[in-house]
Image (cartoon, rainbow, N blue to C red):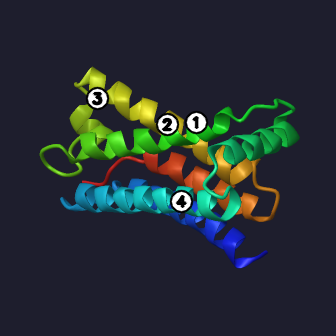
């Protein structure tokens, strides 16, 4: 593996790791858990943007067409469905992550969005729906990126990360 490929892959894994850590941080008993979780998620989003930039620089020569063609090739190899729509799904994912950070950061950092405590938001049906929508999208993206489309033994790191993520969502917050 050359340095460029390593950088593209490493930034994707680091972004994933930051998000998983952000969700684990929410389980902490301290008042600052939400704030730490927000900053970890924000760091993950920044690294995701760096990942997009590295992929476009090193793999696609800043060509949208090249990105769509390569994504279609990879998708066809894994699923038999020849489509480059995954590029646009990745853009939408990046935007959703940013929107979630903005929603989460309104008012008290960590008090809303997917960063908030389910206990505080339980009576807020709309926010609860938002939280689970964001979590479902993130899990879908991470399972695809870190498990399904990974051909190496790193797939098991992806499985572990996804299990930790789901566990963090269902473990009650300590008092």
Q: Position of residue 48 (x, y in %)?
A: 49, 57
Badge nearest the viewer, 3 or 2:
2
Q: Position of residue 75 (x, y in %)?
A: 78, 39
Q: Which residue is mark 4?
A: 53
Residues at circles 2 and 1 in contact by the CB criterion of under 8 Å: yes
Using the numbered discs, state the Cα–Cα distance from disc 2 to disc 1 in whole angstroms: 6 Å
Q: Determine whether 90 is above or below 3 in the image.
A: above
Q: Which residue is mark 1?
A: 88
Badge nearest the viewer, 3 or 1:
1
Q: Which residue is mark 2?
A: 92
Residues at circles 2 and 4 in contact by the CB criterion of under 8 Å: no
Q: Earlier in the sequence, mark 2 or mark 4?
A: 4
Say what secondary structure mark 1 lies in: helix
> Can I make out residue 100 in this image?
yes
Q: Position of residue 116 (x, y in %)?
A: 27, 43
Query: Nearest the camera: 59 or 175?
Result: 59
Say what secondary structure mark 2 lies in: helix
Relative horizontal placement of residue 89, taking residue 27 as reference (left or right): right
Query: Nearest the camera: 38 or 7?
Result: 7
Q: Residue at x 35, y 57 (%)?
A: 42
Badge nearest the viewer, 4 or 3:
4
Q: Earlier in the sequence, mark 4 or mark 1?
A: 4
Q: Which mark is residue 127?
A: 3
Say what secondary structure mark 3 lies in: helix
Using the numbered discs, state the Cα–Cα distance from disc 3 to disc 1 in whole angstroms: 26 Å
Using the numbered discs, state the Cα–Cα distance from disc 2 to disc 4 in whole angstroms: 15 Å
């Amino acid at each position: 593996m050359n340095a460029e490929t390593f950088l593209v892959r490493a930034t994707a894994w680091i972004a994933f790791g930051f998000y998983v850590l952000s969700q684990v941080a929410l389980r902490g008993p301290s008042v600052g858990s939400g704030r730490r979780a927000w900053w970890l998620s924000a760091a993950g989003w920044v690294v995701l943007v760096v990942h997009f930039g590295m992929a476009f620089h090193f793999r696609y020569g800043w060509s949208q067409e090249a990105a769509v063609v390569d994504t279609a090739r990879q998708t066809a190899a894994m699923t038999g469905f020849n489509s480059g729509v995954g590029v646009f799904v990745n853009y939408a994912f990046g935007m959703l992550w940013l929107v979630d950070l903005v929603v989460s950061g309104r008012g008290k950092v960590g008090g809303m969005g997917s960063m908030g405590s389910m206990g505080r938001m339980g009576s807020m049906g709309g926010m609860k729906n938002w939280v689970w929508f964001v979590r479902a999208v993130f899990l879908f993206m991470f399972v695809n990126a870190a498990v399904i489309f990974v051909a190496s033994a790193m797939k098991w790191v992806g499985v572990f990360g996804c299990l930790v993520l789901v566990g963090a969502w269902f473990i009650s917050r300590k008092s």
